[in-house]
Amino acid sequence: MIAIIFLFVIFSINLSAQGLSFLDTQKGYERVGKAFDEKDTKIRRQLSDLGLNPGDLNIVILAYKEESTLEVFGKNTNEEKYKKIIAYPICAKSGEPGPKRREGDLQVPEGFYEIIDFNPLSSYHLSLGINYPNKSDKIKSDPKKPGGDIYIHGDCVTVGCLPMTDDIIKEIYVYAVYASNNTQQSIPVYIFPFRMTEENMKISSERNSQNTELLRFWENLKQGYDQFDSTKIPFPVRIDSKGNYLF
């Protein structure tokens, strides 16, 4: 694994030194190049149907654990509101409803994250790493072993990640490469336990009535859910001293 990462870094440095864009650099990897060959026509058509341009694209990713659904929203850089581009099934689940709080708990995180890693040499075909543990997780989770290495990736196995199959991750990866190439500094990834409608919140409250800590956490997440659902505009993630999200 160390040798692969070392070669990945050296290759990236060499391409950057040649003055290549992030898009060109990524397409220099075999799997990413094949993903563009297979998926770019479909993606361009989907974007065009929504009045979006791959050369001017920003994206937001939303995931719903209970529904096993991941959605990609997009906008052109000069626009404010995002539109839903496509929804994909999440291929496999692990853990139970609720956030990730320690290494080895098999939980998929819940909260407001961003993509911090593009891995074209992933053991799971292609993968996009998110910044778990974020500031909230570091306060609320096990201080010594909160866990990490959470990815949106290919294949169909998971111990806390979001597996999408090799075919689907190709599309998500291409969308993310376009957005990053367009200098989108942060690609938000919002992971919710379920679609946090009033009806679903009532059902979940009844199911988990004895777990007041979990219900408080979900009420906090719902504020962010409602904000994006009503405005279709991402928001800055702020955290208070107790690890709660502020909106």
Image (tube, rainbow, N blue to C red):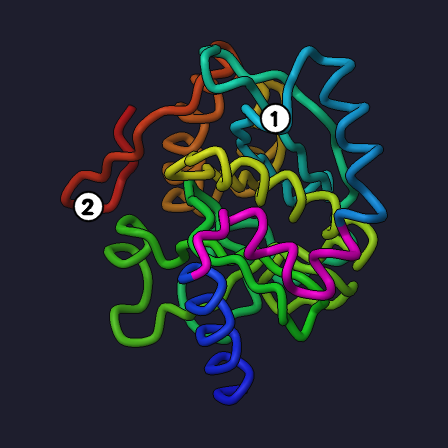
As drawn, 208 above or below 143:
above
Find residue 42 and report its horizontal and vertical position in percent: 84, 33
Say if the magenta span includes residue 21. yes
Q: Residue drawn 66% across and 59% down?
A: 153
C-alpha gap between disc 1 and disc 2 = 30 Å
In the image, is residue 22 part of the stretch drawn in magenta?
Answer: yes
- Magenta span: helix, strand or loop, mainly? helix
Whole-percent x and y of residue 141?
32, 61
Q: Is residue 128 left or right of residue 29?
A: left
Q: In the rendered image, which residue does mark 2 sit on? A: 242
* Residue 76 falls in image quadrant: top right
Which residue bears the numbered disc 1?
A: 73
Q: Residues within 10 Å of mark 2 (few under 14, many from 20)?
A: few
Task: Give the percent coordinates (x, y) of residue 127.
Answer: 61, 60
Name the foreground residue: 142 vs 126: 126
**Three-letter code, disc 2:** Lys
In what quadrant of the picture does the C terminus appear?
Answer: top left
